[in-house]
Image: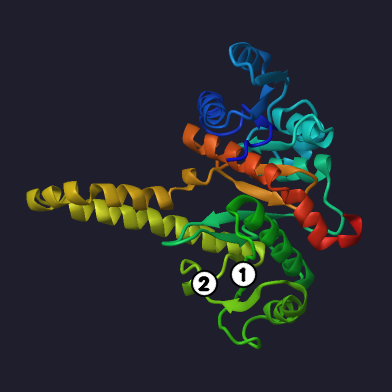
């Protein structure tokens, strides 16, 4: 088996509801899981320096500012140049790190990555992707919140970026791509969907046509493309549904002594199902289309989620995700 090449990931130690403790524990888990991983830690000196002193593959990069969840993203990025988020993106831009992970403000991470790292040539709108668990293979859904209003050509670019992510991180050689719509026919849906379908048919390799909402969890395609407003609604609906479903299963299995006995037999299967549905399993959402790898974790990230997010960042670098996107959206620039 070929050894993984070394990758240096910058981690924002101040991002998330449980920072810095859960973030540092996640870093510890990630370092243990990947012998070729190196991390740069941004955050207050009294947090990052003592941690790094006892870990040979961890480097501290002290910062003096923190962007809070309530801060206005773009304003905070401009006014807090020594924040853990902005400095992390700057390290990627300057080549000192190859990827950045943060469970902090999504808006601030997007703004910093776009303003500091910059967009890849040919990318008008970076997009946030997420992994949707299904009974068989995971599906990439994008955009899930970066762009509420889109043009047809933006959806074409999202498709190319989703393909690159599926190839680099999920290992899918030739991803099938679907356009989220209210019907399978090319003439169904909004003006945006109809025009995007026509463009994708000629410009996107592996385009399989429209997919309906009921097919999101069916693994009919590897990548599903939509605008950020619709994608965010779909994501939040799926998250709420999975939580409700798991609660219903738990209540059904513990409502009587006989059912509790049956639950003991079914427990391993239920735990596996919960793991597939748990966002912590996938760690974070990539912001695709920027000059580098940027993975944004959810605010309530546990150490397990942080570890997974750092792992995704390393796989994206090793899989050449930014280069794949650049080649797809602007071949002449590659």
Quadrant of the image occupied by residue 145 = bottom right
Image coordinates for residue 236, horizontal then vertical, percent: 50, 57
- Tell me the residue at 59%/61% (across/down): 141
Quadrant of the image occupied by residue 315 = top right
Image coordinates for residue 46, horizontal then vertical, percent: 63, 12
Nearer to the camera, 321 or 67: 321
- Tell me the residue at 72%/59% (across/down): 161
Residue 83 appears left or right of 300:
right
Relative to 6, is 253 above or below? Answer: below
Mark 1 packing: few (<14 Cα in 10 Å), some, or many (20+)? many
Instruction: Residue 16: give its label.
Output: none
| Element carrying mark 2 | loop
Dot 1 corresponds to which residue? 176
* Quadrant position of the N terminus in the picture: top right
- Tell me the residue at 63%/16% (across/down): 56
Dot 2 corresponds to which residue? 220
Relative to 88, is 126 above or below? Answer: below
Quadrant of the image occupied by residue 158 = bottom right
Q: Is residue 145 visible?
A: no
Relative to 218, is 128 above or below? Answer: above
- Tell me the residue at 17%/46% (across/down): 264
Image coordinates for residue 175, horizontal then vertical, percent: 63, 65
Colour scheme in use: rainbow
Mark 2 packing: few (<14 Cα in 10 Å), some, or many (20+)? some
The mark nearer the N terminus, 2 or 1, is: 1
* Quadrant position of the C terminus in the picture: bottom right
Image coordinates for residue 57, horizontal then vertical, percent: 64, 21
Q: Are marks 2 and 1 in contact (CB under 8 Å)?
A: yes
Nearer to the camera, 11 or 2: 2
- The Cα–Cα distance between marks 2 and 1, rounded to whole angstroms, is 8 Å
Nearer to the camera, 268 or 226: 268
| Element carrying mark 1 | loop
């Amino acid at each position: 088996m070929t050894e993984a090449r070394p990758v240096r990931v910058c981690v924002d130690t101040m991002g998330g509801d449980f920072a810095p403790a859960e973030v540092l524990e996640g870093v510890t888990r990630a370092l243990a899981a990947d012998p070729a991983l190196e991390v740069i830690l941004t955050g207050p000196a009294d947090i990052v320096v003592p941690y790094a002193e006892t870990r040979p593959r961890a480097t501290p990069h002290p910062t003096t500012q923190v962007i809070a969840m309530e801060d206005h993203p773009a304003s905070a990025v401009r006014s807090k140049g020594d924040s853990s988020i902005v400095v992390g993106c700057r390290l990627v831009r300057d080549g000192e790190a190859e990827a950045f992970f943060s469970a902090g403000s999504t808006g601030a991470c997007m703004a910093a990555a776009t303003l500091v790292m910059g967009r890849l040539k040919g990318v008008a709108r970076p997009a946030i992707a997420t992994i949707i668990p299904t009974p068989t293979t995971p599906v990439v859904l994008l955009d899930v919140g970066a762009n509420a209003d889109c043009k047809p050509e933006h959806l074409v670019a999202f498709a190319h970026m989703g393909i690159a992510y599926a190839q680099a991180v999920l290992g899918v050689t030739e991803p099938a791509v679907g356009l989220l719509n209210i019907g399978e026919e090319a003439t169904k849906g909004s003006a945006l969907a109809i025009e995007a379908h026509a463009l994708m048919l000629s410009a996107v390799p592996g385009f399989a046509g429209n997919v309906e909402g009921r097919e999101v969890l069916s693994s009919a395609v590897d990548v599903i493309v939509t605008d950020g407003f619709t994608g965010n609604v779909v994501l939040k609906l799926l998250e709420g549904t999975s939580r409700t479903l798991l609660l219903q299963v738990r209540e059904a299995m513990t409502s009587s002594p006989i059912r509790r006995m049956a639950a003991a037999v079914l427990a391993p299967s239920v735990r596996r199902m919960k793991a597939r549905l748990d966002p912590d399993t996938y760690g974070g959402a990539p912001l695709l289309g920027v000059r580098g790898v940027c993975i944004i974790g959810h605010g309530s990230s546990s150490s397990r989620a942080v570890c997974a997010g750092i792992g995704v960042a390393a796989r994206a670098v090793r899989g050449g995700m930014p280069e794949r996107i650049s080649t797809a959206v602007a071949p002449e620039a590659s």
